[in-house]
Image: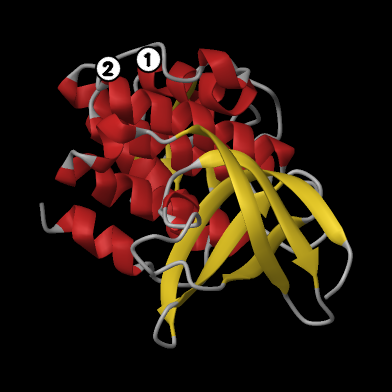
Amino acid sequence: MGNLIEVHGMELSSMPIGEYDRRIVLLTKERGKISAFARGARRPNSPLVGATRGFIFGTFQMYEGRDSYILKQANITHFFEDVIKNYNAICYACYFAELAEYYARENLDATDMINLLYVTLKALAKAVIPYSLIKCIYELKIIAINGECVDLFTCKGCREEKHNIVGYAKDLQGVLCADCTAARIDLLPLSPSAVYALQYIVTSPMDKLYTFKLNDNCMKELSEVISTIRNSTIDRAFKSLDMISTQ
C-alpha cells in the first residue's frame, strides 16, 4: 500500500468493477483528473457506498499506488440531491461532468473547472434559469477556461475591437462588425444582447455566471453560436449530449 494522500474535488463518474468494487474518476484541485478503485463499495454495508455516487463534492483520502489510487474514505460536503432526483437535471449534469472529464488532465490545476462545476450544479438544483441557458453558459465557459475560446471582442475582418459586432462567421471562426459583413452568407446574426451575453460569460467570475435570462430570439442566437464554437473546438461526440437532445 502506498502513501496516504488527501485531495479535494468532485466525482465525475463511477462504474462497477468485478463483483463488489467500483472505479471512480475524480477531478481534484491537487492532482487534476485521477482514477481510484473503491474496494467493496458495492456491498450494501460498505462505508464507501455514499462516496462512490456521482456529483458529490468533498475530501477524499486514498492510497497512492504505482498505476492508480485506492479510496480509503471520503468526507462529502455536498451531495446535490435536487439534481439527483430530477431526471432532466441529471442528464445535463452527466453532460457537464463528461465535458469536464474530456478537458481534465492528471497533475494539472483543476480549480477553475471544479468551481465551474460546483456553481453549475447549484444552478441546475435551483432551476431559476432554463437548463438550455445553463448548458450554453457552461459550454462556453469551460472552453474559455481551457484557453480555446475564440476572441469575442475583436472583429475578424478589420482586426479591431468593435462595439458594433453583428454576427459570427463560421468559416472565419470569429465575430464580425457591421462594416465587415458584406456578402457573407455563413453569418450567424447576433443582436446586441446576444453579443453582450457571450462576452459576459467569458469574462465574468464564477459566482456571477448564472444571474441572467434571455428572451427566445436572443437565446436562439446564443445557442447557435456556442454550438458552432463547441463543434469547431472539441473533436469528439458525447453520449450524454445525445440524452439531452432527445428530451
**Foreground residue, 185 or 56?**
56
Q: For the point 42% across and 36% down, which residue is it?
A: 79
Identify which amino acid the numbered label 2 is placed on.
Answer: Leu
Q: Provide the secondary structure element on which disc 2 rests.
A: loop
Identify which amino acid the numbered label 1 is placed on.
Answer: Ser
Distance CA(mark 2)–CA(mark 1): 8 Å
Give the vertical position of 29 relative to 190 (above or below).
below
Q: Residues within 10 Å of mark 2 (few under 14, many from 20)?
A: some
**Foreground residue, 63 or 231?**
63
Residue furthest to the left in view is 247
Q: Quadrant of residue 218?
A: top left
Q: Is residue 99 left or right of residue 5?
A: left
Instruction: Assess whether mark 1 and mark 2 are in contact (beta carbons under 8 angstroms).
Output: yes
Q: Is residue 144 left or right of residue 180?
A: right
Which mark, by number, is residue 235? none
What residue is disc 1 on? 193
Q: For the point 56% across and 15% down, which residue is it?
A: 207
Q: Quadrant of residue 126?
A: top left
- Which label's residue is closer to the chain start, 2 or 1? 1
Residue 75 location in percent, x, y?
A: 60, 39
What residue is disc 2 on? 214
- The quarter of the image holding the N terminus is bottom right
Q: For the point 53% across and 52% down, which residue is it?
A: 11
Q: Residues within 10 Å of mark 1 (few under 14, many from 20)?
A: some
Give the vertical position of 168 relative to 95 (above or below).
above
Residue 138 location in percent, x, y?
A: 46, 37
